[in-house]
Image (cartoon, helix red, strand yellow):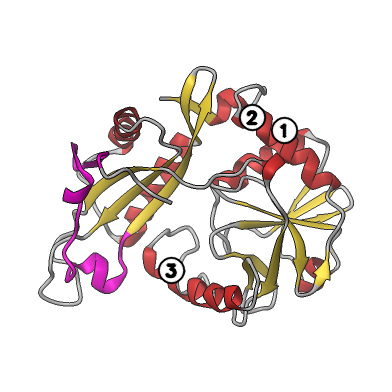
Amino acid sequence: MSSADDGVIWVDGVLVPHQEATVHVLSHAVQRGSTVFDVLRVQETSGGPSAVGLREHVARFDRSMDLMGMEPAVGVAELEDAVAQTVQANPGTNLVKLVAAWHTKPASTLPDTVVPQLSVAALTADMTMPSTAQPVRACSAAGPKMPPEVLPPSLKVAAAYTYGIRQKMAAKAEGFDEIILRLPTGELAEAVSQSLFVVRGEDILVPPLDVVLDGITRRMVLDVAGLVGCKLLVRGIDWDEVETADELFLCSTTNPVLPLGELDGRKLAERAVTSRIGEVVEQLLGGDHELSSRWLTPL
């Protein structure tokens, strides 16, 4: 992921050079991991760039700020407009990151204000489409996902990712691409920054939102899955159902449909349902599907 040095970032209503969009090393955001964020995809279509799930991403970002106790100076409509401004000012953007940070140096462990600095950054990232996504190797995480009683899964705050990132780094050193987290009960949760779908026959199983992030790409894929004739089951998923699944695939902003080729040493060769869903998702993102107008917002 990169950003052009000569590009601009929207910071509290003003477009500023990248080098000026900074926070202090002693800020609450850095010292306490309290930064709230969201990330959305920008897709090039025949009509120009479009944001994927713009309303949903901005609403989730706003909800995360509320859960963190932040009181932003602008509302959802202004943030949506900020995304459009930032993309227009940075041609070639394919990813946008919204950031809310307590950027000042607090006198104690608590922030000295409830009003965060808001930023919208335009980035260029390695993005895949389902037709180009290569199957990945995954392993089950060494420890369980943080329970929702400790940290709500709907809160996208930097500190929530530290535990999973540490485990994923260890897995990467062993040759794996991803880790799959379980709940303290042993049931399926999700990957560090991706949702996991379990395919059994024509059934698609996903965990409920009281234990996993309400992924925006997850919502989009569930919309598509219903259209291609799959039965959707949202419920707790025992780990043995994951281990014996016909297919497993991940989804995220950068990888809308990403098949698993291996989990804990077990090879998964079947990808019929995954491929079917991927084909429709690709049409949707290209602007050529009945769901495109639902998910794409021209910028």
Q: Amino acid at mark 3?
A: Ala
Q: Residue furthest top?
A: 47
Q: CA distance from mark 2 to mark 1?
A: 6 Å
Q: Are marks 2 and 1 in contact (CB under 8 Å)?
A: yes
Image vertical order of residue 97 relative to residue 50, above or below? below
Image vertical order of residue 263 relative to residue 282, above or below? below
Is residue 32 on the magenta stretch? yes
Q: Which of the two labelled residues, at mark 1 and mark 3, occupies the earlier sequence position?
A: 3
Q: Which of the two labelled residues, at mark 2 and mark 3, occupies the earlier sequence position?
A: 3
* Residue drawn 60% across the image and 44% down it: 128
Q: Amino acid at mark 1?
A: Val
Q: Are marks 1 and 3 in contact (CB under 8 Å)?
A: no
Residue on which disc 2 sits: 284
Percent from the top left, x then y, of residue 44?
51, 28
Q: Residue furthest bottom?
A: 142
| Quarter where residue 294 is shown | top right
* Residue drawn 57% across the image and 61% down it: 212
Image vertical order of residue 240 relative to residue 20, above or below? below
SS under mark 3: helix
Image vertical order of residue 219 relative to residue 47, above or below? below
